[in-house]
Amino acid sequence: MSRLLSYYLALVSGILFSPCKASESIEAIAFGSCLKQTRPQPIWESVRACKPDVFVLLGDNIYGDTRDMKKLESRWDAFAAVPDFKRLRGDCRLLAIWDDHDYGENDAGREFPKKAESQKLFLDFLGEPEGSKRRKTPGIYDSVTFGPEGKRVQFVLLDTRYFRSPLKLAHKREQGKGPYEPNDSEKAELLGEGQWQWLEKALREPADLRIIASSIQVVSTSHGWETWGNFPRERQRLLALLGKTKAKGLLVLSGDRHSAEISKLEGVRSSPLFDVTSSAMNQKQRPQSEVNPHRVGERYFEENFGLLKINWGRPKPLVTMEIRDLEGKVVRTAQVTF
């Protein structure tokens, strides 16, 4: 069966586009990252039980790690064929960003030679319409808003790969930390100028709650692995832009770390900035210590996914942030009122 025929069969069967309509109120948002397509994915059953209106894939959605686009395509196809994941796509709206392994190479940035070809495969997997702006623009960043006035939820989907400068190796690797250190160069980029201009416009659009999806952590900066902290000028530019645009109702969702945690940054805005990290959905990591002065509670190292529950029935919207385990039980939680 040709890929084009498969696409249209999926379209008419409702697999690619979910029943969630832009005018409907969003009350539950599930999210997660880091799925090895060669391993079982039982967690989707627990995700579906939460009945999310939207699910956000936060990167490393497959482990492609290849410059052979036929192999990368086959790995996307294997993920798309997972039965409970297919059912989820029929239940709710699917949004996604990528990270290094589904981009094509470990810790890769703009130097990856197959990035344009990889972008096409990523958008094919999502069922992105052929004539969409996302297909005509370098990178996979996007913004979409759901819900009626007073309950508008904007999803700002960042691309932290396509335009990113190479990482800077630490001069001397510290014990318990990763191999990278901050790059203070004025030439060091994370988003690229075109994406920055788009982001400012997106943050000025009307919304009551904004979800910024970043494949790497924004708030936690000191662990030496991939983080916005490796590009301190870019991180400061982001925080300044959030203030400049007066964007309200902000939350960050991130992945990558093969552990889950909730981070809270105080003092840069009138309200705290939360960064909810969910990783990995079908992999475990041996518990280890890692410095994060912004962490709320403890890290979680077993399989997990995240869930945001929005209570619109209050004078100010209340958002409950949860990390849930393989069985769907809440293992970490925090709340914020906007």
Image (spheres, rainbow, N blue to C red):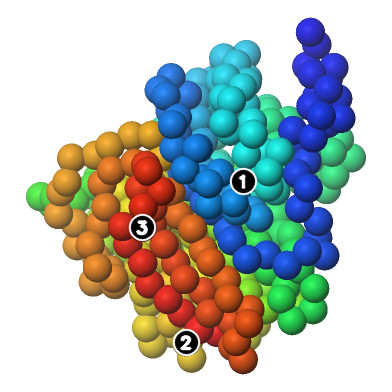
Q: Please, which residue is most extreme toward the top here? A: 1
Q: Disc 2 residue type?
A: Ser
Q: Name the front one of labels 3 and 2.
A: 3
Q: Is residue 176 visible?
A: yes
The residue indicated by pointer 2 is 271
Q: Residue 304 versus residue 174: which sits nearer the camera?
A: 304
The image quadrant that residue 203 belongs to is bottom right
From the image, tell me which residue sits under label 1: 96
Going by the picture, which residue comes out furthest to the right?
A: 131
SS for tag 1? strand
Q: Nearer the viewer, residue 22 or 197?
A: 22
Please determine whether, in this image, residue 299 is positioned above or below residue 119.
Answer: below
Q: Earlier in the sequence, mark 1 or mark 3?
A: 1
Q: Indicate the amino acid at tag 3.
A: Val
Residue 24's spot in the image, x, y percent? 78, 64
Identity of the residue drawn at 60% across and 87% down: 314
Q: Where's the C terminus, which quadrant?
A: bottom right
Upstream in sequence: badge 2 or badge 1: 1
The relative height of residue 79 versus residue 135 in the rendered view (above or below) is above
The residue under label 3 is 330
Please tell me how crowded label 3 is: few (under 14), some (14-19), or many (20+) other residues with Cα within 10 Å: some
Give the structural element (helix, strand or loop) at label 3. strand
Q: Position of residue 176 (x, y in %)?
A: 13, 50
Dividing the image into 4 quarters, which one contains the N terminus?
A: top right
Q: Is residue 224 left or right of residue 278?
A: left
Which of pointers 3 and 2 lies earlier in the amino acid sequence? 2
Q: Residue at x 75, y 35 (%)?
A: 16
